[in-house]
Amino acid sequence: MPGTDHPINRTLDITLDICPMTFVKTKLELEEMELGEFLEVLVRQGEPLDNVSRSCADEGHTVHVKENREGEIWRLVIERGDM
């Protein structure tokens, strides 16, 4: 899902956090945003990447971009959905 054509409204770096704090911080950030805004999240591969992606979708948000940035760091672009 490469692409950078989404207007990024906020960026969240959770590369130093571990689960479940990765999703908690992402959820709190999304709650501060308006419907339709885009959040860029930098996250480590493995459990944090899987959990944030899945949990955001479960909460009604849309993950538009999921791309490897460098090594274990991934970039997600999440559109704030109707929670």
Image: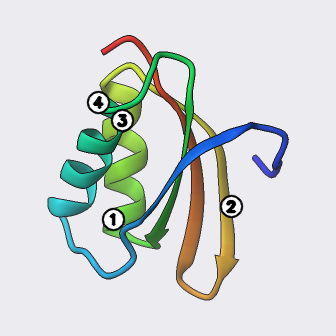
Label of residue 31 in the image: 4
Residue pictured at 83% horizontal, 48% vertical: 3
The residue wearing badge 1 is: 48
Q: Nearer the viewer, mark 3 or mark 2?
A: 3
Q: How many marks?
A: 4
Q: Quadrant of residue 36?
A: top right
Q: Gap between marks 1 and 3, in whole Å? A: 17 Å
Q: Gap between marks 1 and 4, in whole Å? A: 19 Å
Q: Nearer the viewer, mark 1 or mark 3?
A: 3
Q: Gap between marks 3 and 2, in whole Å? A: 20 Å
Q: Nearer the viewer, residue 14 or 7?
A: 7
Residue pictured at 40% horizontal, 71% vertical: 46
Q: Amino acid at mark 2?
A: Glu
Q: Amino acid at mark 1?
A: Pro
Pick whichever of labels 3 and 2 is earlier in the sequence: 3
Pick whichever of labels 1 and 3 is earlier in the sequence: 3
Q: Nearer the viewer, residue 48 or 33?
A: 33
Callout 1 secondary element: helix
Q: Are marks 1 and 4 in contact (CB under 8 Å)?
A: no
Pick whichever of labels 2 and 4 is earlier in the sequence: 4
Callout 4 secondary element: helix
Q: Amino acid at mark 4?
A: Glu
**Residue 43: x %, y % from top left:** 45, 68
Q: Gap between marks 1 and 2, in whole Å? A: 14 Å
Pick whichever of labels 1 and 2 is earlier in the sequence: 1
Colouring used for the render: rainbow
Residue pictured at 57% horizontal, 53% vertical: 76
Q: Gap between marks 3 and 4, in whole Å? A: 4 Å
Q: Residues within 10 Å of mark 2 (few under 14, many from 20)?
A: some
The residue wearing badge 2 is: 67
